[in-house]
Image (spheres, rainbow, N blue to C red):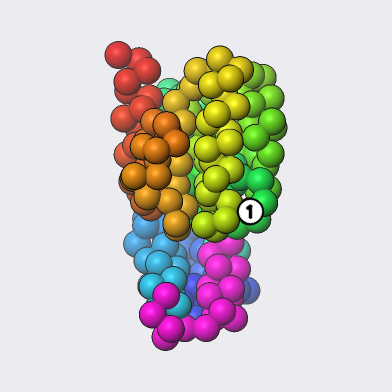
Amino acid sequence: MYRVVYEGEIEAAGLVAERGLAAGLDPLDCLNRGFMPALERVGEEFGKGEKFLPELVAAGEAMQRALAVVQPHLAAARRDRLTLGRVLLGTVEGDIHEIGKRIVGSLLVAAGFEVVDLGVDVPAATFLERARELRPSIVGLSALLTTTMVRQKEVIDLFRRAEVRVQIMVGGAPVTASWSEEIGADGYAEDANSAVALARKLAGGLRS
């Protein structure tokens, strides 16, 4: 599993995921122990100049293919659990990066949350409209570009002006804890696993 994502073998990634699940592997283990570490390593090597953009893109597409296979099994395996809450996820306006958000969504489903994914390039008004409609306990805002980070603040400011109170968590490669504090978010996660831990903490605070 690690190799097919690391080497960007897109078709093979889906096949390997299918075979692993058919062999009885836990879908969450497939992500946490196989596919995700490979993508993280490619990202690190790209940052150091050891990998090039086509290799990063290929690894991301391989991860997407594996996710498409694994994600339904994550939901099915947790269907009998009581939900920890509803999470509304989206990548902010002007940003079309999806892979990190999808991984977070998959892990949240596996942890017992109901996840509604709004996709990418989501305007602040859409976040507000869907939050009013769906009444989530948590809204997650992803931004993968320094130029789109400000959109996270725009969403939070809009929610405040509309007096819609919901826990808002932020994340993405350029996002930091200090930025989260500056814009008034309820929490910041530096990676997918910490996003799940943060969501559990925020949901627990809502129930207490």
Q: Is residue 15 left or right of residue 167?
A: right
- The residue that label 1 is drawn on is 95
Residue 52 is inside the magenta segment: yes
Q: Position of residue 78 (x, y in %)?
A: 45, 35
How crowded is the residue under tag 1: few (<14 C-alpha within 10 Å), some, or many (20+)? some
Residue 127 is inside the magenta segment: no
Confirm whether residue 101 shows in the render.
Answer: no
Q: Is residue 45 left or right of residue 115?
A: left
Of residue 80 and residue 22, the one placed in the foreground of this image is: 80
Identify the residue shown where x is 58% and y is 51%.
148
Q: How many marks?
A: 1
Identify the residue shown where x is 42% and y is 75%.
47
Identify the residue shown where x is 58% and y is 36%.
154
Which quarter of the picture shows residue 83? top left
Q: Is residue 89 left or right of residue 201?
A: right
- Magenta segment, which residues? 47-64
Q: Position of residue 44 (x, y in %)?
A: 38, 73
Of residue 117 and residue 81, the one placed in the foreground of this image is: 117
Q: Position of residue 109 (x, y in %)?
A: 48, 39
**Element on which disc 1 rests:** loop
Q: Quadrant of the N terminus?
A: bottom left
Identify the residue shown where x is 32% and y is 23%.
204
Going by the numbered disc 1, the residue's amino acid type is: Asp
Of residue 35 and residue 134, the one placed in the foreground of this image is: 134
